[in-house]
Amino acid sequence: MKFLKNLFNKWTSDRFVFMGGPDTREAPASVETKAKKIVDDVTLAAVPKAEMFDKGMTNIERHIDGLAAGSAEEDKDAAKKFAKQIKGKERERLTQLRDEYLAKVKEVSLMKLDPDVTEEFKEKVTEFVDQLKEKYAGGTSKKWAHELSYFIDQGKMEKAKDKPLQMHKVATDIVINYLTRRDKIGESKTPLNKQMVEGLAPYIAKQLGDLAGFESGEDLAAHIEEQLTDDKNIMKEAMKDLAESVPQIRATSEETSFVRNILEGNKEFEMYFGEAYMDQAVDVIAKQLEIVFDGKGKPVAYVNMLSGRSDRPNLNHTKVNEAGMKEVILKYAKEIKAKNKPEALDEYQDELTDREDAVNDRISFLTEGHYWNGVTGEAIDEIADLEKGRPTELVSLLTDTKQFRGLNEMNEAFKNVEGAAELLANNADNPAVMGIARSAASSGLDGSALADLFKLISDLLTGKLWNNDVAKEIKEDLDAGKNPVEKAEKSRMAFAPMLIDAPLGTLLTIHKEPGKKEHLTALAEKAKVTLPETISGIQQQVLKDMVENRIKGEFGADALTFKEHKSGDLAGSTELVVTRGEDKFTIIRKPDGVTTFQKNEEAVETISKEQATLAKLREKVTGEKAVEAVAEKLPKNEYIENGILKKSVIDNVHIEQVLKDDGLPIETAEIKTEKGKRKLRAHKGPRIKGGETIKVERRGKTFVMTEGRGKNKRLYVYPGDEIVSINRKKTPVVAVAKIKKGAS
Amino acid sequence: MNKTTTQITDEELTAKLKESHLASSEKETLEPLIPHMDDSEREALMGLIEEASDIKNKQEAGEAKYQEALRALNQEYEEKMNTVIKEEMKNARKQFEAKEQAEEGKELEEIESELSNM
C-alpha cells in the first residue's frame, strides 16, 4: 500500500495549494508560498469565485487519475475505483455549494446599474451624433469638411454659388487656408504642396456643396466638371480662332503694295534700293510689319515681327494712323540702309525666317491641343478673359513660350494629383486609404512620388496589384519616412522581364507558389535578372499579380480562376478558367505538362509542354499572332535590340514599342494616329497618365489599356485591331484615332 | 428653455464636452459641430453631458455596493468551501488508514499462517 501513502501525501499537498488555507499537514515551503499567493490574489480580486469551485472539480478528476497512474499495474483498477468512491461525496458537496454561491452572486449583482440603462444612453448619444453629422456634414465621411468650415467665407460662397468655376477657386482658397492654418483647430499642419491642394479642390467642392446646400455634393462636382468641360471646349475653339489670327510672317498683297507705295514714293529709298533691291526691300519690310487695315486701305495697327527675343517675339499690336505707318516703314528702311545692302536685307530675311518658325511653333502648340490636356484655375481665367475680348492677355500668352511650357508642366502634375484627389473623394469612407494618404501627405514626398503612390493605392483598391498586407507595408514605410514607391516598383520591375516569355506551366507554378525560388531561377538566368536573396511578402504578391495580369493581358480576359485538382482523373492538374466577355476558355495542365485547351467547353486542342505558351494558346483559338510571334521574322539589325522587339510591321499595321534605357518596355506603345497629330510617347509629351485610357476595339469587343508601368500593363495590339479612342477621365475623348494602315 | 444653457459660448460648451463622460470618439465628432449647432441642439448636448455624468455616478455607486457584497459573499463561501474540503480530507485520510490497516492485518495473517504451516 505504499503507493497509496505516497499518492495521498502528494494529493493533500496539491490540495493544500488549491485550498490556500492552513492545514494540519506540514507543507513544503515553496508550496506554502504558492498557496499564499493564490489566497492573496483571490481575496484582493474579490471576484466571483465560481471558477474556484470548478478548479476543485478538476482537481478531483486529476487526483483520481493520478491515483490510478501512480499505482502498480495490478492495483490500478482498484485504486481508481477506491478514489472515485471517496471523492464522490466531496464532488456532490462542492456542487451544491457552488450553485448556492452563484445564486447569491446573481442576487448581489443587481446592485450594479442596469446595463440596459447605459446601452439606451449610448444609443441616444449615437442617434444625436448621427443626426448632427447628417445635418452639418452630410455623412460620416464629412468630418474634414466640418473642419474646413472654419475657413469658409460665406459671402464668397454665396457669390460663387451659381458659378461652378468660381466655386472651384473658392474651394481651393479654402483648402489652402485650411491647410496652412490647421494647427488652429488642434491638428498639426499638413505640408501639402500647392498642386496637391489644387488637386483636392474638386473633392472639397463636393463637401462645400453639401454645406452650402448646393444640390448634392455629387451633383455639384458633376456640374463643375461639366461646366469646366464646356468652358474648355468654348475656349479651345476661341483659342484656335485666335491662333489663326496670330500675326504671320508673311506679306499680304495689301501690305506689300502699301509698303511699296511708301518706299517708291520716297526719293531717298527709291535711289538707294534701286530696281535691283527694291522688291527684296519691300518684301522684307512687309513681312516684318504686320499691318492691320480698316477695310478701306487705311492702316489702324501694326505689329513689328522682329521685336522681342528671337524665341519670344513681341506680338503686341500698336495703334497707328496712316502717317504714323509711313514713318514706321521709313524708320525700318533707314535701319536697313544703315547696315548696308544687300547683306542687311539677307540678314533681315534670315531673321524673319527664324521668327516664322517660332511663331509657327506656338500656333502649332496651341492648335495641337497640348494646352488642353489639363485645367488650372489660372489658365482658365486667362483664357476666359481672352474669350471676352481682351486680346492683350492672348498676345501675352501667345508670345510667352516659357509661360506656356510652365503651364503645361503644371497641368501634367496637376492631372496626376487630380486623379488622386478623385480617388480620395471616392474613398473618403475608407480609413486605410485616408490614413495612407494623410501619411503620404505628411511624409514630404514630392508631387510625382505622391502621384505614384496614389496610383498604388488605386491599384490596391481595385485589387489589381496590392492586398492589405502590402498596404500595411506601404504605410509602415511612410510612417518611417521612407518612400514606398521605390520599393514597390523595384519589386515589380525585378520580375517583369522574367515573365515575358515564360511558358504557361511556369506561370501557373509561380502563381501557385510565388515564393519558391527554384521556379524562378532558370527564368531569371534567361532574362538576365538577379533575384533577391529572399522573396519578401510584398514581392510574392507582386509576382502573383503579375502572372495574373500577364495571362489576362494575353487573352484580353475579364477574370481568371485557378483550381488545383486533388483527386479524380485530373489529380495533380491545374485548371485555369479564363473568361472574356461571353467566352470561357478552360486550360487544364496535367502534371506531365500536357495541356488541354477548351473554348466554351469544347476541346480545341491538346498541346505539348513545350508548345504551351500563352501566346501559342491564344493563337490556337483565335488564329491571331501576337506582335512578338512574328518578331523573329524581322531583320534583327533593324528591329530587334537585346532580344526585345522594338518595331514591327504586321499586315501593314504600324506599331512601335519604345524601350527604356534599361531595355524594358515602357508603359505604352507609341501609336501614330490617323492625322499624325496625337502621339503617345514614352519619354516626352502627353502620354497615358492618371485616369487616361486607350480603348481598343477587337471583334466588336472593347479592351481598355489603363496607365501603368511594367510589362504586365501592356496591351497587345493585333492585326485588325482598331484604336477607337484615347480617353481621358477629366475630359471627353480628345482624339479618335485609327491605327495607320500602310505606314512604314 | 433654460437661458443659461442657450447662452453658453462655443468655448464653454467645448470645454464641457471635453470634460464629459461621453465616449472619446463622440467627443471628437461633436467638437467641430458645436459652432453649427442651434439652441435646441446645444441644449440637447448639454442634457446628454449631464445624463452621462449622472449615469457615471450611478454606475460607480452601484459598483461599490456590488463589490462590497461580493467580497462578503466570497469570504463566506471560501470558508464554507475550505470546511468541506478539510472535512473530506480528514475523511479520506481515515479511509486510507483503515484500508492500510486492513491490508497490513491480512498480510500479517498470511505470514502467520505460512509460519504455522512450516
Image (cartoon, coloured by chain):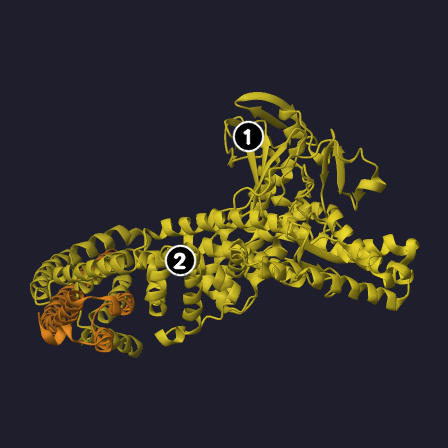
Q: Amino acid at mark 2?
A: Ala
Q: Secondary structure at mark 2?
A: helix
Question: Judging from the image, what is the letter of the chain drawn in yellow?
Answer: A
Kindly identify which chain the residue marked by label 1 belongs to: A
Would you say residue A688 is visible in this rendering?
no
Kindly identify which chain the residue marked by label 2 belongs to: A
Q: How crowded is the residue under tag 1: few (<14 C-alpha within 10 Å), some, or many (20+)?
A: few
Q: Are marks 1 and 2 in contact (CB under 8 Å)?
A: no
| Apparent colour of chain B | orange
- Quadrant of residue B118 in the image? bottom left
Q: Amino acid at mark 1?
A: Lys
- Quadrant of residue B80 in the image? bottom left
Q: Is residue A259 above or below residue A48?
A: above
Percent coordinates x, y for residue A185 in the rendering: 35, 74
Residue A54 as seen in the image, left or right of residue A454 = left
Q: Secondary structure at mark 1?
A: strand
Q: From mark 1 to mark 2, how far is it between C-alphas?
A: 37 Å
Q: Nearer the viewer, residue A420 or A556?
A: A420
Q: Nearer the viewer, residue B6 or B115?
A: B6
Percent coordinates x, y for residue A298 in the rendering: 67, 54
Q: How crowded is the residue under tag 2: few (<14 C-alpha within 10 Å), some, or many (20+)?
A: many
Residue at 44%, 49% in the rendered image: A227
Percent coordinates x, y for residue B96 in the rendering: 18, 63
Q: Which residue is mark 1?
A: A701
Q: Nearer the viewer, residue A672 or A669?
A: A672
User: Can you tell which of label 1 and label 2 is closer to the viewer?
Assistant: 2
Q: Which residue is mark 2?
A: A205
Would you say residue A737 is visible in this rendering?
yes
